[in-house]
Image (tube, rainbow, N blue to C red):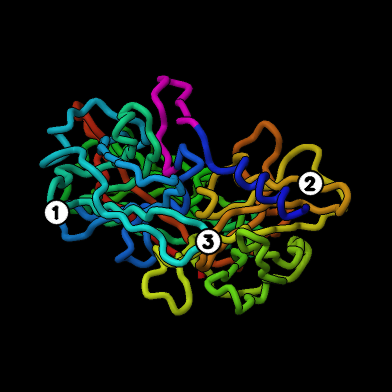
Amino acid sequence: MKYIKSILLAFLLLPVSALAFDADNGKPVFYTEAFSKDIHSLQCENFSHSPYYPIIELGSSQFITLKFDDFSPDIKTYAYRIVHCNASWQADELSESQYIDGFTGSYLSDYETSQNTFFTYTHFELRFPNDEATPSISGNYVIIVYDNEYPDVPVITARFMVVQSVVSVQCKATAQTDIDVNGKHQQLAVTVDYPEYNINQPSTELKVVVQQNRRLDNQVVLDAPTFYERHTVNYKLNKDLIFEAGNEFRTLDISARYVLDRDVKSIDFFKPYYHVTLYPSAIRAKKQYESWRTVNGRYVINMQSAYNPDIEGDYLFTHFTLPMELPYLDGKVYILSQATGYRFDRYSVMNYNYETNEYEAVLLLKQGGYNYMYVYVPNHSDVGSLAEVEGEFWQTGNEYAAFVYYRPFGSLYDMLIGYGVTFFK
């Protein structure tokens, strides 16, 4: 009975959401997300780079790959269109001919049906650029996927970026912050050099977006540099660039059904599906820091001994538990991971069980390797904290990325003119 209830709960919590709207101008803000309960394992990345991001160089041979699984009983005819966005991921005023060479949309013709799996699905992939379309300018882009019968109803939106690297971006992370030294935080410094590029008013024409481990809740948008010299702007000694150090991501390997990962208690078949039960997770806030290699929140689809994990990998109901004597009354606990879209919603939330005194969640995950953490989000806030459950350790190997947008006076769009990635070591 417990697992029957878990199946029903997992399906009820599948990621169905609506576009978020900006409070200032009422335009929707696009994210990488699915709007149908039938869509799973949505990824949009440049898999040729490590670490991978959904970003390609303008005019290069690089491409991003959009991939997802569809649980619909019939193979859907999906189409897509591409929209150019501003630095805030809202559609700008450009016409399609101003940002695409070729056709802005077509059909998703690359798909295969799953093989020898208990969950039956159709795996779709789309590469961009392709023979039908190529981006002609830099900036933020969104792929909108829709059922061909309902072109005004998005099934998927997926972010990606096109960069024209005309500036050099250096990032440096340190534990010697403006509020503590080798304590609970890390501070980033960003320098943008443009010796051969003309930026007339860097204080008003540049916008720098900084992310820690690709998280969206605590990302920082810098509109003005701390100081600048000739052909160089610096974002240093800025308290907005102080981040919780947090802890290393927890890891989970479910690439095999018969070999148990260290955190997997059991893998059982309860007809008609498999269930993974994890050992209860320890609260790490009061433990000593432990270092291990992670991919900072990402996940990789993989199945041991499979020729093609994308269509041979099965889905497993994965049960997470976090023992806690009493629940939080002033906030909620969520699972933070690329697998949950780095979002705090009904799909990633954990529910408190008063009978067992633990938080519980069930995620339907495809076979592979996953990174995740437990994040506490106070009520009436959209920014999470790792301090409550995971702890804060200055040694944590966090990943930081800075994206530099440029919009000169009179321009119709935000150019992406450079980016940099660094790791705290």
Q: Which mark is residue 118?
A: 3
Q: Which residue is mark 2?
A: 352
Evaluate whether residue 216 shows in this view: yes
Q: How many marks?
A: 3
SS for dot 1: loop
The residue type indicated by label 2 comes to Tyr
Q: Nearer the viewer, residue 24 or 153?
A: 153
Q: Which mark is residue 177?
A: none
Q: Position of residue 184 (x, y in %)?
A: 66, 58
Q: Relative to residue 200, is residue 165 depicted above or below? A: below
Side (left or right) of 220 relative to 162: right
Q: Are marks 3 and 2 in contact (CB under 8 Å)?
A: no
Q: Nearer the viewer, residue 28 or 118?
A: 118
Q: CA distance from mark 1 to mark 2?
A: 51 Å
Q: Position of residue 20 (x, y in %)?
A: 47, 30
Q: Position of residue 52 (x, y in %)?
A: 37, 61
Camera-side mark, 1 or 3: 3
Q: Residues within 10 Å of mark 3 (few under 14, many from 20)?
A: some
The residue type indicated by label 3 comes to Phe
Q: Nearer the viewer, residue 154 or 172?
A: 154
The residue type indicated by label 1 comes to Gly
- Which numbered disc flags the more N-terminal residue, 3 or 2? 3
SS for dot 3: loop
Side (left or right) of 38 relative to 248: left
Q: Are marks 1 and 3 in contact (CB under 8 Å)?
A: no
Q: Which residue is mark 1?
A: 59
Evaluate whether residue 227 shows in this view: no
The answer to whether residue 398 is magenta is: no
Question: Looking at the image, which residue is at 26% across and 47% down?
Answer: 108
Q: Residues within 10 Å of mark 1 (few under 14, many from 20)?
A: some
Camera-side mark, 1 or 2: 2
In the image, the segment drawn in magenta is: 18-33
